[in-house]
Amino acid sequence: MTKVVFPGSFDPIHLGHVDIAQRASEVFEEVVVAVYDRPSKALLFTSSERIGMAKECLKAYKNIVVVGYSGLTINFAREIQAKVIVRGLRVFSDYENEFRMALANHRLNDEIDTIALITAEENMFISSTTVKEIASFGGNVSSMVPPLVEKALKNKYRPRDAEPI
């Protein structure tokens, strides 16, 4: 059984993430979507919120599980006995960063490979940072995120005295 891990902060999960997870689930027997609890960037959503949104957005795929993790991704992959780390590539600049990360992970554990899937064309411009920036100004992100995430973003960015959506 080939188990793979698709790690990320997923802050928030967007349609590009869903695309990569879904396509990985067609190739591999089990996909573990691993939500990193402490990335080196400011987070909008808590770990439990990010895990909950990812679980809800990916529940239709029976061979995808969503879990939280901390520490080095390569160590987490070894702990869950994953054979491969799956990463998504959107633009050329992603490649350089992912290439360096894959080489470092290989140095730490040469029994776990990294495979990069190129995102679907319609998702190439989507990043969590872009989604959050647009949502923070009240922009429409409905074509970039699942409806559950759109609602969560609206609630995060609503005025403090407004009623929850």
Image: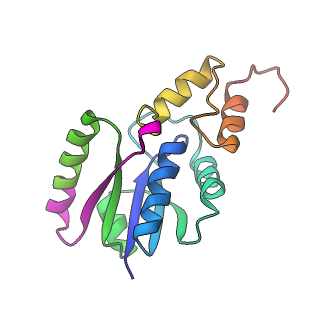
The location of residue 162, given as percent across then percent down, is: 83, 22
Q: Quadrant of residue 153?
A: top right
Q: Is residue 107 magenta?
A: yes
Give the x, y percent position of residue 148: 70, 44
Left or right of 31: which side holds 82? left
Q: Is residue 34 visible?
A: no
Q: Quadrant of residue 140?
A: top right
Q: Residue at x 38, y 68 (%)?
A: 4
Task: Examine the rendering and report whether any part of residue 109 can be seen.
Answer: yes
Q: Vertical placement of 6 versus 30: above or below?
A: above
The C terminus sits in image quarter: top right
Magenta residues span: 104-122
| 56, 158: nearer the viewer | 56
- At which x and y percent is residue 37? 48, 50
Q: Residue at x 47, y 30 (%)?
A: 129
Residue 154 to residue 37: above or below: above
* Outermost residue toward the front in this view: 121
Q: Nearer the viewer, residue 47 or 144?
A: 144
In depth, the one of 5 and 95 nearer the eye is 95
